[in-house]
Image (spheres, rainbow, N blue to C red):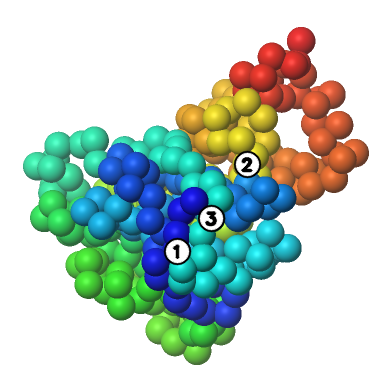
Amino acid sequence: MYPIVKRKQLADKIYLMDVRAPRVAQYCEPGQFVIVKTDEVGERIPLTICDYDREAGTVTIVIQTVGASTERMAALQEGDAFMDFVGPLGCASDLIGEEIGELKKKRILFIAGGVGTAPVYPQVKWLHEHGVDCDVIIGARSRELLIMEDEMRAVAKNLYVTTDDGSYGFQGTGTAQLQALWDKGVRYDHCVAIGPMIMMKFVCKLTKELGIPTVVSMNPIMVDGTGMCGACRLVVGGEVKFACVDGPEFDGHLVDFDQAMKRQRQYQTEEGRAMLALQEGNTHHGGCGNCQ
């Protein structure tokens, strides 16, 4: 069992939890994720690692309630425990594999939408701890739905806050904020965008026009997290990839977002899954061996 040692509500339907999982905390890196299961009958939920403390043996996750399983998960209190807490899964952020000297030469921008702020935070924190400055744009539909503003402000060189309704900060999307900065002469060499798929699609559309290499963290439907189920199948640069083992980060200018969003919707029904299996043939699954 994996006890919850801290629980905090960040916004409506959004909760932060510190979970004691020493082996996961020992090995996880920014950009990776875990799969969490509440109990024997609970659904396996993939969650990006928001933070970690190797000394305390804890991993921080952020949960947004969207269905019965996440509602049950969010209802857990400090002292309760998860039955399964598997990770770290996926590949770490490419940034942490680069030479620090080279990173310091880059002007790096992160754009986070909604709960995408949670997986952006550990990357920005890691860069800050290694003396690398970066700018961050965080956005939400309204001020009440913004999360982790203070935490992000402590590690970002410049933090720009946007809200769709103009209730706080810049009125508009993160994409509009980037365009406004660009129009003022601010330039970037690298961008990381994490948030809803439609948001990442339009960030990539703009950054491609501006000539800014862009990485996105893909969060499609995921089941087993090992590349076997095929739920997180993507097309990147014309090649089939699986977000759980090949990602979750990919070159955003190569991701087929329209195909990914269509597949997400289709995968939600039994009939849709059967049609995907027929259409995708032997690339429908990863390593399950069932698609001959």
- Between residue 105 and residue 130, name the one nearer to us: 130
Q: Is residue 117 visible?
A: no
The image quarter containing residue 242 is top right
3 or 2: tag closer to the N-terminus = 3
Residue 182 horizontal/vertical position (percent)? 33, 64
Q: Residue at x 15, y 56 (%)?
A: 129
Give the residue at mark 3.
82
Q: CA gap, disc 3 to disc 1? A: 8 Å
Residue 74 horizontal/vertical position (percent)? 58, 68
3 or 1: tag closer to the N-terminus = 1
Label 3 crowd bin: few (<14), some (14–19), many (20+), radius 10 Å: some
The answer to whether 52 is drawn above or below residue 151 in the figure is: above
Residue type at the position of mark 2: Met
- Between residue 129 and residue 5, name the one nearer to us: 5
Give the residue at mark 2.
222
Of the residues tagged 1 and 2, which is closer to the observer?
1
Label 1 crowd bin: few (<14), some (14–19), many (20+), radius 10 Å: many
Residue type at the position of mark 3: Phe
- Which structural element holds mark 2? loop
Residue 233 horizontal/vertical position (percent)? 63, 32
Residue 129: mark: none
1 or 2: tag closer to the N-terminus = 1
Q: CA gap, disc 3 to disc 2? A: 19 Å
- Which structural element holds mark 3? strand
Q: Is residue 164 left or right of residue 151?
A: right
Marks 3/1 in contact by CB < 8 Å: the verdict is yes
The answer to whether 66 is drawn above or below residue 193 in the figure is: below
Residue type at the position of mark 1: Ile
The quadrant of the picture occupied by the C terminus is top right
Q: What is the total number of numbered labels drawn onto the structure image?
A: 3
Give the residue at mark 1.
4
